[in-house]
């Protein structure tokens, strides 16, 4: 796995080239506007990031497993830090857009001001959004076209055309949900780092330390003394060799899956990793309930809101559930019963919504149900993370204990044999 110094020089040169190109782009953005083409600027950014990625890839193979461990640590820390910043930024942007729409302020002027502050790709999208708004294109269509906000927020705005401010506010995550998702993302980064550390330690032990221990035991002719337990202990690491090799081959895939999970938890990737998204239905339910509350305030039919959400929501499994609710509504089922059968609300919550409709407080009840579901799910998620962390640390401790016994037990047997010979 470890190669010569030439590969290190090439990898370091690629990394430095990528950093220099990105630094030049940053200086260009800070300077006054230049008549450079957008295609050229995007090409420079692509060249810079590609040099960084290729250089990091070569460095990982040049430095061996330690390089992979270092890259996993750096990537995990960078993703968590950058994604946290962008999550706060997007929540603030949604709140500002909602306030502007609610007060009927010029959104295009705000977008141009934000473009001057942000720069980069996000700034260019804000400028194009402002141009569309000046041309008379609705805000929902412009947001869907340029993706200034997350896909879930775009779907909420499309679902509430009579109350766009309510749709934007519906997409803002609550404090409980944002905190729980951030903790889950940090836990994923920690778990990724622990897995890579344990795998690198096991590989180093099996391929570097075990042969030397075998030579020491053979040199002292202590195989018979240590055989009853040593053979059993040695069988486990050597049996793990194929699994460790398999992990080494698929370690980039594990790193990619971990990074994907982190970005999805923080709202920067609309598509959930396999299987994991089914444990986070509560996020989609809360968004749908808040959109229904906005529809009630805007006197918009609930069927229209659910139909738009079923077409525009980024999660395919939740779209399928919404389509089931719309089919039930089309067949003449009462709206609260359709929500219960579609598993958007529980049966007792459906009764609460019916009572709130009769009292004229349906929008308030929908908002409270969404907030209550998020608080309950966030609490359960935090409890699950608290329970998983000791299991993860205990598993790594067990592996370390097995490796330690495998190292020291033959030495103890050798010392006993030397004492017995004397």
Image (cartoon, grey):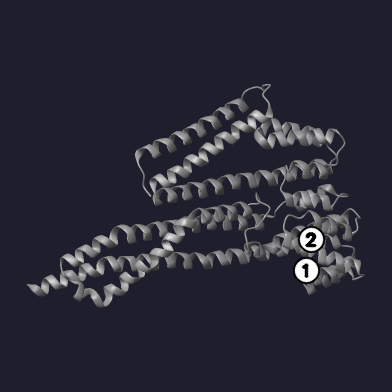
> Residue 307, how many percent across, how many down?
85, 58
The residue depicted at 39 percent of the width and 49 percent of the height is 64
Q: Secondary structure at mark 2?
A: helix
Tell me the number on the disc at residue 39: none
The answer to whether residue 229 is above or below residue 154 is below
Q: Secondary structure at mark 1?
A: loop
Distance of label 2 from label 1 (alpha carbons): 9 Å
| Callout 1 crowding tier (Cα within 10 Å): few <14, some 14–19, many ≥20 | many
The residue depicted at 78 percent of the width and 68 percent of the height is 345
The answer to whether residue 98 is above or below residue 348 is above
Left/right of residue 119 with respect to residue 133 in the rendered view: left
Quarter holding the C terminus is bottom left
Quarter-of-image position of residue 319: bottom right
Disc 1 target residue: 345
Can I make out residue 140 in this image?
yes
Disc 2 target residue: 289
Quarter-of-image position of residue 412: bottom left
Quarter-of-image position of residue 331: bottom right
Q: Earlier in the sequence, mark 2 or mark 1?
A: 2
């Amino acid at each position: 796995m470890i190669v010569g110094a030439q590969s290190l020089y090439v990898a370091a040169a690629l990394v430095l080239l990528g950093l220099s190109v990105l630094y030049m782009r940053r200086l260009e953005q800070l300077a006054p506007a230049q008549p450079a083409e957008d295609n050229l600027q995007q090409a420079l950014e692509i060249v810079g990031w590609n040099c960084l990625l290729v250089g990091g890839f070569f460095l990982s193979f040049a430095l061996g497993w330690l390089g992979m461990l270092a890259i996993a640590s750096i990537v995990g820390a960078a993703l968590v830090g950058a994604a946290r910043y962008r999550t706060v930024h997007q929540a603030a942007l949604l709140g500002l857009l909602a306030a502007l729409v609610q007060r009927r302020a010029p959104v295009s002027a705000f977008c141009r001001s934000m473009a001057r502050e942000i720069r980069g790709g996000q700034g260019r999208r804000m400028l194009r959004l402002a141009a569309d708004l000046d041309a008379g294109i609705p805000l929902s269509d412009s947001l869907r076209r340029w993706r200034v906000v997350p896909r879930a927020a775009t779907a909420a705005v499309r679902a509430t055309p009579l109350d766009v401010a309510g749709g934007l506010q519906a997409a803002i995550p609550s404090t409980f949900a944002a905190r729980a998702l951030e903790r889950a993302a940090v836990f994923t980064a920690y778990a990724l780092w622990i897995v890579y550390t344990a795998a690198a330690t096991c590989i180093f032990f099996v391929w570097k330390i075990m042969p030397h221990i075998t030579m020491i035991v053979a040199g002292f002719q202590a195989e018979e003394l240590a055989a009853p337990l040593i053979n059993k202990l040695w069988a486990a690491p050597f049996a793990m060799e194929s699994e460790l090799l398999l992990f080494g081959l698929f370690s980039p895939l594990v790193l990619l899956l971990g990074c994907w999970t982190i970005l999805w938890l923080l709202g920067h990737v609309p598509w959930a990793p396999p299987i994991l998204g089914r444990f986070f239905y509560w996020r989609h339910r809360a968004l749908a309930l808040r959109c229904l509350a906005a529809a009630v305030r805007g006197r918009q039919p609930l069927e229209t809101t659910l139909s738009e959400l079923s077409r525009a929501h980024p999660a395919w499994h939740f779209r399928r559930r919404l389509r089931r609710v719309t089919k039930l509504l089309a067949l003449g089922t009462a709206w609260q019963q359709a929500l219960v059968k579609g598993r958007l609300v529980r049966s007792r919550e459906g009764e609460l919504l019916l009572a709130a409709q009769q009292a004229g407080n349906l929008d308030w009840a929908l908002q409270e149900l969404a907030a209550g579901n998020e608080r309950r799910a966030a609490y359960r998620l935090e409890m699950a993370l608290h329970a998983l962390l000791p299991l993860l640390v205990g598993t790594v401790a067990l592996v370390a204990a097995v490796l330690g016994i495998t190292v020291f037990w033959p030495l103890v047997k050798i010392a006993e044999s030397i004492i017995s010979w004397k």
